[in-house]
Image (spheres, helix red, strand yellow):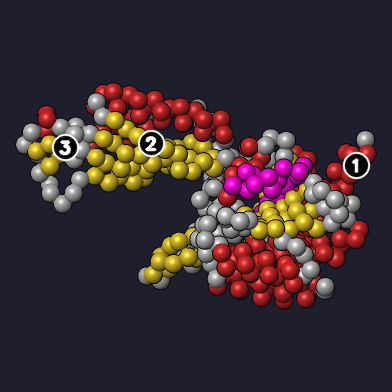
């Protein structure tokens, strides 16, 4: 396949994926499209009985090296209507994964081992990585790579970073159980709104070392009905916690639990809560990063290889290394002129960079296979 043929085919694939977005855990048609395309290429994709997503192996033997892409779109308002929308670049990530598969197909006879390409569902829910780990999809891997398109504020169009240092995030939801009362008899009730206000005040008193980037705040609160003369006894809330390091997130979590306990005791209210999502901060492996850097230099030139990027956003990809510290991981940062920004309903980027991204990923996978081969010969 020539460079021009690869570029034209990837543009066609991207167009289809972009125009057919599906939200987390509902990537049914996307999974079917990918599986059928892979079968047409002569592969045997592995799907799952009770969930979306798939993976495919290329080469001989047990896969020791892998690449993971996400699949899901966001649900957001676009031009006045809510619908699924690929505003985080997952359509581009899947396109690069397929481009990598096409390139690896040509290299298969010379590969020193097998590669696993993983199409992961539910990244936006921060649930897909855990689900795939429970399926044993990454158990045999020593290296796992990922990628993400980047906004202009982080990477210029046509430049590439060997690592992305995403931050950690936790999303809590909960219910405050107070006591309803007449508005004229507040002493007979436990006002759930006042309890929530005390939670907000307590969260503001959680101190983290100034050198550590972190925040925790209430982002949703619902309480009371249509009558304004009733002390509300029940309220539901959401808490968004962010930290650049996993250790800092652990400290925030402990602090949050103490605030819940103290406010509950102070007001005599029961406060239930749960963790709806936990996104681990990046744990970039030096060897994996060095491999990705060399791949960027080999494909795009040293002048287009940038330093690694530290970004406040979260990425479910990092849960793989968080749960399995022996897994060597890094993510390619793809500078492709994302504008106005990630998750913006009108987000767009330079899709001409997708073939280069596929070539860099392919090169990184080959270099990682060679690294594994050298290690096993020692």
The residue pinned by badge 3 equals 180
Question: In the displayed structure, would residue 16 be above or below residue 69?
Answer: below
Callout 2: SS: strand
CA separation in Å, label 3 and label 2: 20 Å
- Residue 261, by quadrant, is top left
What residue is drawn where x is 26% and y is 35%?
177
Quick one: SS at disc 1?
helix
x, y (%) of residue 361?
75, 56
Q: Using the image as rendered, state which of residue 283 and residue 67 is in the foreground.
A: 67
Q: Residue furthest right?
A: 377
**Residue marked by disc 1:** 374
Tell me residue 300's x, y (percent).
78, 60
Q: Earlier in the sequence, mark 2 or mark 1?
A: 2
Q: Is residue 286 above or below residue 339?
A: above
> Of tags 3 and 1, which is closer to the observer?
3
Give the mark, 3 or 2, whose residue is nearer the N terminus. 3
Across and down, in percent, residue 44 comes to: 75, 62
Which residue is at the front of the view, 207 or 80? 80
Cα separation between marks 2 and 1: 49 Å
Residues rendered magenta in the picture: 131-147
Q: Which residue is mark 2?
A: 273
Q: Please report the residue visible at 67 percent of the width from the left and 37 percent of the height from the top.
A: 324
Quarter in which the N terminus is drawn: bottom right
């Amino acid at each position: 396949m020539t460079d021009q043929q690869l570029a034209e085919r990837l543009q066609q694939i991207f167009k289809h994926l972009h125009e057919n977005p599906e939200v987390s855990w509902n990537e049914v048609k996307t999974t079917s499209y990918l599986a059928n395309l892979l079968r047409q290429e002569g592969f045997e994709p592995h799907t799952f009985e009770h969930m979306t997503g798939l993976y495919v192996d290329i080469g001989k033997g047990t896969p020791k090296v892998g690449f993971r892409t996400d699949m899901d779109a966001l649900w957001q308002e676009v031009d006045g209507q809510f619908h699924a929308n690929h505003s985080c670049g997952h359509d581009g990530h899947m396109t690069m994964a397929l481009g990598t598969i096409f390139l690896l197909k040509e290299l298969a006879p010379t590969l020193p081992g097998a590669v696993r390409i993983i199409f992961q569902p539910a990244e936006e829910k921060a649930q897909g990585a855990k689900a795939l780990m429970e399926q044993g999809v990454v158990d045999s891997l020593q290296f796992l790579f990922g990628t993400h398109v980047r906004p202009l504020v982080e990477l210029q169009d046509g430049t590439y970073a060997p690592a992305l240092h995403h931050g950690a995030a936790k999303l809590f939801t909960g219910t405050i159980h107070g006591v309803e009362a007449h508005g004229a008899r507040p002493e007979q009730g436990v006002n759930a709104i006042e309890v929530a206000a005390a939670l907000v005040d307590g969260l503001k008193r959680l101190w983290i070392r100034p050198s550590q980037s972190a925040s925790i705040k209430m982002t949703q609160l619902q309480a009371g009905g249509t009558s304004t003369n009733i002390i509300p006894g029940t309220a539901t809330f959401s808490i968004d916690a962010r930290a650049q390091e996993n250790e800092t997130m652990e400290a925030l979590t402990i602090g949050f639990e103490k605030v819940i306990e103290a406010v509950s005791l102070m007001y005599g209210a029961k406060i239930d809560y749960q963790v709806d999502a936990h996104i681990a901060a990046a744990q970039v492996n030096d060897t994996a990063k060095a491999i990705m850097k060399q791949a960027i230099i080999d494909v795009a030139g040293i002048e287009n290889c940038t330093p690694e990027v530290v970004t406040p956003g979260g990425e479910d990809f990092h849960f793989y290394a968080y749960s399995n510290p022996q897994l060597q991981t890094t993510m390619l940062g793809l500078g492709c002129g994302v504008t106005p920004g990630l998750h913006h309903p009108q987000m767009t980027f330079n899709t001409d960079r997708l073939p280069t991204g596929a070539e860099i990923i392919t090169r990184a996978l080959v270099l990682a296979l060679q690294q594994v081969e050298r290690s096993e010969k020692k």
